[in-house]
Amino acid sequence: MPPDLRATSGPAVPLPRRVRVGYGLGSLCTGTFATVPGLILLYYLTDVLAVPAAVAGFAVFLPKAWDVLVNPLVGAVSDRSRLRGGPRRPFLLIGACTLPPLFALVFAAPPLRGAAAAGYVAVLFLLAATAYAVFQVPYVTLPAEMTEDAGERGRVLGWRVGFLGVAILLSGALAPAIADAGGDTPAGYRLMGVAVAGLIAVGMFGAWAATKDAPTVARSEAEPTLRAQLAAVREHRPFRRLVAMWTLQALAVGVMLAGVQYFATYTLGSATAVTPLFAALIGPLVLVMPLWNRLSRRCGVRAAQWCASLLFTAGSLLLALAPVAGAGVGYGAVAVVGVAYAGLQLLPLNMLAETLAADVVRTGRRRAATFTGLWTAAETLAFALGAGVFALVLAVTGFRSSDAEHQVAQPEAALTGIALGMSLLPALLAAASLWPLHRYAEAAREQEPAPEQAQEQEDGVETERAR
């Protein structure tokens, strides 16, 4: 077994099934909150609340950009916490109590239009993003602290990724369907916000309750300041390049999610087409996830990540032909992207787990909280920036905003911008991610310790733990 996949301790006691499944439930929150705002919030602002595209882009992007600062802060506060229930679970509960109502309020659609509506949404979305960070950072840290066994950690992450697929598929199909059933009116979005908030609450409270009996066999600690955290990343080349790869790919996915509703309405000519489009994008997630897992075990996770990245790029390029070749090509291209997206959801997490395990072996320090906090911040920023980039495409190409009662015709340039923003732009971003992926493989090989060195470092970790 390669040194970056070895456990750092002896045989581990398997975690109770209730803990593994319950931990996975938390992905009902993380998958939903990452999907629904990215999918429909920009469209909600421009086509329901009559917010200009450029202003709407800022309203979506700035609150999520705040996570770059708040995520590392949450990690540090959680590490120092002496709250009853441990350093992580109290934060899960705080997030569970605050995020669902704040999410519902984002889509409450008050009687405001234009810049005033954008301000309202931006403030509520910022508060919701903060509540999400309070839950997400400790949640991502938990697997590294519940078990030191790589196989057991993989089983925990398997449940997490499985529920993630369910959350993305369910919320991504449910949210547009509810909004569309209400005629894309403020009332329809208001109902959608309440329904999705309920799904988020189930996942958050479920993860908090089920991890009550989870063991804590290791304690990872974040660096005390943001400067120290960034310094740790600067000296860790594999992690730095892995984050660069995933940030570009998450940005590509974010752009595509932001464009789905516009692509359905203005390229395919039907707002209701967003549901089958999204089903084609996310439907393969649950079906082919085991195949990506099998490929990663057979060929290695890095080789599997190359396959997923190239497939995503090819599917995005094929999607550019949809305005000429017809809706069938569009649905087929989105399905290809969906198969690749399943790999992109699973494989970077496995690579992150490899990198963190290798860091323990190499340095003897447990810095999972530092790295997962910055990973979450980069991911959140990329998804938010995706909506902002697509909004910029709309603004540059002359897209005209409207409200639910008064839809306006779009200029030809805007229609072209929607088609290319949904296809060519994500393809270019995914292609750009191949370079840091290549550099990650090089850096990871350079930092893999020799077998004798790895054993000495593991012995040192065990001796320190015994003390």
Image (spheres, grey):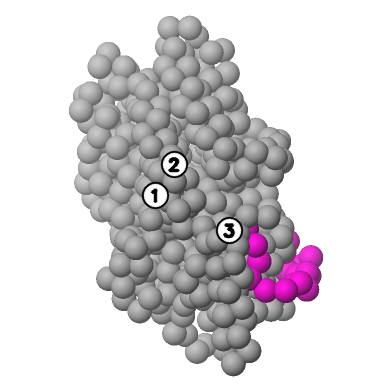
Q: Which residue is mark 2?
A: 437
Q: Amino acid at mark 2?
A: Leu
Specify the quadrant that holds the N terminus: bottom right
Q: Give the quadrant of residue 339.
A: top right
Under tag 1, what secondary structure?
helix
Query: Residue 30 placed where, x, y %?
Result: 54, 55
252 sits to left or right of 93? left
Q: Which residues are magenta?
A: 4-23
Q: Nearer the viewer, residue 53 or 429?
A: 429
Q: Confirm or deny contact between disc 1 and disc 3 (CB under 8 A).
A: no
Query: Residue 230 placed where, x, y %?
Result: 31, 65
Q: Confirm or deny contact between disc 1 and disc 2 (CB under 8 A).
A: yes
User: What mark, if any, has residue 241 been given in the picture?
Assistant: 1
422 sits to left or right of 460? left
Under tag 2, what secondary structure?
helix
Categorize mark 1 by other alpha carbons within 10 Å: few (<14), some (14-19), many (20+). many
Q: Is residue 16 magenta?
A: yes
Q: Earlier in the sequence, mark 2 or mark 3?
A: 3
Which residue: 46% across, 13% down? 322
Which residue: 57% across, 25% down? 336
Categorize mark 3 by other alpha carbons within 10 Å: few (<14), some (14-19), many (20+). many
Query: Residue 6 placed where, x, y %?
Result: 65, 62
Q: Amino acid at mark 3?
A: Asp
438 sits to left or right of 197? left
Q: Earlier in the sequence, mark 1 or mark 2?
A: 1
